[in-house]
Structures are given as C-alpha cells and as structure tokens.
Image (spheres, grey):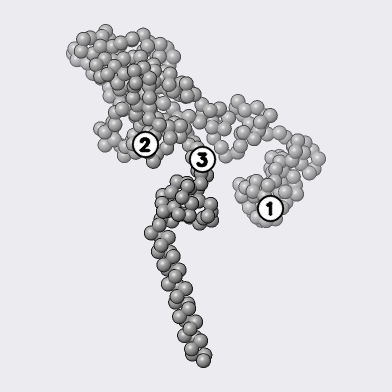
Amino acid sequence: MEPSSKMEFFQKLGYSQEDVVRALGKLGEGALVNDVLQELIQTGSRPAAQGRPAGGAAAPLLVPRGSCGPPDLAQCRLGTDPEDECGGPAGALRPIVIDGSNVAMSHGNKEAFSCRGIQLAVDWFKDRGHTSIKVFVPSWRKEPSRSDTPIRERHVLEELEREAVLVYTPSRRVSGKRVVCYDDRYIVKLAYEQDGVIVSNDNYRDLQSENPEWKWFIEQRLLMFSFVNDRFMPPDDPLGRRGPTLSNFLSRKPKPPPPSWQHCPYGKKCTYGIKCKFYHPERPHRAQLAVADELRAQTRAWYGASAREERLRGAGAVAG
C-alpha cells in the first residue's frame, strides 16, 4: 500500500495525521498496515474524538455489523470473536451435547429409562444461560414400553423434540430384527465439531481407540454427573482437583483464578517454599523456591563469598 493510501486508510479509522506520520516515521514508509495499527494502539493514540481528523473533514463513523449498536463501540473490538464480545453471556458458553440414554438410565437407577432425568439436565444448563443444547436418544425409544425396557414420562421426549432440543438417532427393522445406528458416535462427533461439552458417565473407550483426536477431546471435554433424587449435580472440578472449575470448563474463554493475597500466617518462618498458597510480602520480586533449593542457593553464595575472600588474601600476600 502506498504511503498516501495508508494515510487515507488510517484517517478513515479516525486517527489524526500527526499520529500516523509519527508511526510511519518510526516504522518506515514500507511498514505493513497491521504493524502501523499496532504502533498506533501501543503508543496510546486513539481515533479523533467525534471522528474529526486533522484535515477538518468529518471522518466516517465505523459502525460494527450485528446486534451491537454504535453507542458502545468499545465492546466490539478489532481482532476479537464477535460472538464472545457482542453476543452476550450465552456466546461465551460452550455447546452442550447430552447422552440422553445415559442420563435417563442414571436417573432411573439403571432400572428404567427416566425421561424426567433428561429434562432435569436440560433445565440445569438452561438456567446457567446455555442456548445450544442437544440431546441424542435412539429412535427405538419411541416404541411402546416393554417390561424389560420400561420408559417413564415419555411425554418429556415429545416436548423436547418440539423445542428442537432432542434428536433421535436412526434405527429400522430388517427381517424382524432391529438395526440401530451407534448413537455414541453421533454424540462425540457433534460435540467435537462444535467444540462443546459431552454430558455422560460413559467413557467412550471404543471411540477413543478409533480416533486420536477424539481420544483427547473425550478426556478433556467429558462432563460426568450424579443425581441426588431429582437434582442434577455435575462436579465442581470436572478434571480433578488441579483442573479448571466447572464455570471455566463450560466457558469458551476461561477466566484465570483471582490471586490469593492472604498473608502467610507463618511469615518468614514458613517452610512450605513454592508449595505455600499464601502471599509472602518479604519476597515480592523473586519466584518462590522450594526449601531445598533455597538452601542450595544460600550454600553456593556462601562458597562464592569464601572463595573471593581467599583470592583477596592471596593477592595481598603477594603484594606484601
């Protein structure tokens, strides 16, 4: 892009001519547009207030497309995901894919297919703000209930299907035998493609061996659960005590945990070293070390000081 074209481009963005000239003088006339824009942002330059560049003509106001209106342009920043920045809280949450059979049998205590369990799980995610929720159930569950496969509250499935939440996986009968498609593959495939979360107590070991990418995804995105009577309860630490919280697990952009500023009750006498979870004001500018590492560092410093003293003594004896 020619220098004049660059100047016109950045003036249309609302930057003054002086700021653009200063940035081009620092980076050179041949600098890329992205580099110049980054320099303008880093130097604290901002588009001219009310959109007037140095020439006096009114610069066009850039209005982002979508649901964000012009009064709050700061929320729609360049280089960010519009779904996260402008789509509200729901856009920051991962899609949910529920293993309907697993959830229903878990709520039915493995004795019956309890459709109410599926409704409880769907309602739990809706209450948290999730809008993308899909439930997979084999289509043969539409058949009349039998003594060996009892189904409770079938009307729940009909309501979820009308809401476009429930999806039946296909099945058919051939020569009197039922041919059933593997619903687990539907569940894992959709969750993987949408970068979502699988809700199930099944580990899908057979599918993990089929695809290495699915193996990693199942290990990292499987949300297990428990039912306490009619209460759906996923764990607060889906990946273990050292893993993310449930809120971060369900979010597209996890929030870092807040720093702990509670002072250590032991102060300088603390022997936990790097494992101490409390704040130590006496060492603010250096990383916390384990006790053994601190002792080694102190020993090396002591030996270094002793060696310097011996060299000074030797130099003094030679001079004498």
Regarding residue 213, the answer to whether it shows in the image is no
User: Which residue type does callout 3 highlight?
Assistant: Pro
* Local crowd size for mark 1, using a 10 Å CA cut-off: few (<14), some (14–19), many (≥20): many
Residue visible at 31% across and 14% down in the picture? 114
Residues under numbered marks 2 and 3 in contact, where contact means CB atoms less than 8 Å apart? no
Q: Where residue 149 sits: x, y (%)?
A: 23, 13
Q: Nearer the viewer, residue 69 or 239?
A: 239
- For marks 2 and 3, the one nearer the N-term is 2
Q: Which is more toward the observer, 26 or 112?
A: 112
Query: Do callouts 3 and 1 mark residues in contact (Cβ within 8 Å)?
Result: no
Classify mark 3: helix, strand or loop: loop
| Amino acid found under the numbered disc labelled 1 | Leu
Callout in the foreground (3, 1): 3
Give me the C-alpha separation between circle 2 and circle 1.
Answer: 49 Å
In this rendering, which labeled residue sits more in front, label 2 or label 3?
3
**Front-most of residues 137 and 239:** 239
| Front one among 105 and 266 | 266
Q: Position of residue 154 (x, y in %)?
A: 33, 10
Q: Which residue is mark 1?
A: 24
Q: Judge from the rendering whether residue 305 lies leftward or rightward of residue 2; answer left or right.
A: left
Dot 2 or dot 1: first in sequence order is: 1
Name which residue type carries label 2. Leu
Residue reaching furthest to the bottom: 320
Can residue 301 be seen at all in this image of the molecule?
A: yes
Under circle 1, the secondary element is helix
Q: Which residue is mark 3?
A: 258
What residue appears at the point 43 percent right and 35 percent down from the top-left corner? 245
As drawn, 121 above or below 295: above
Q: Which residue is mark 2?
A: 239
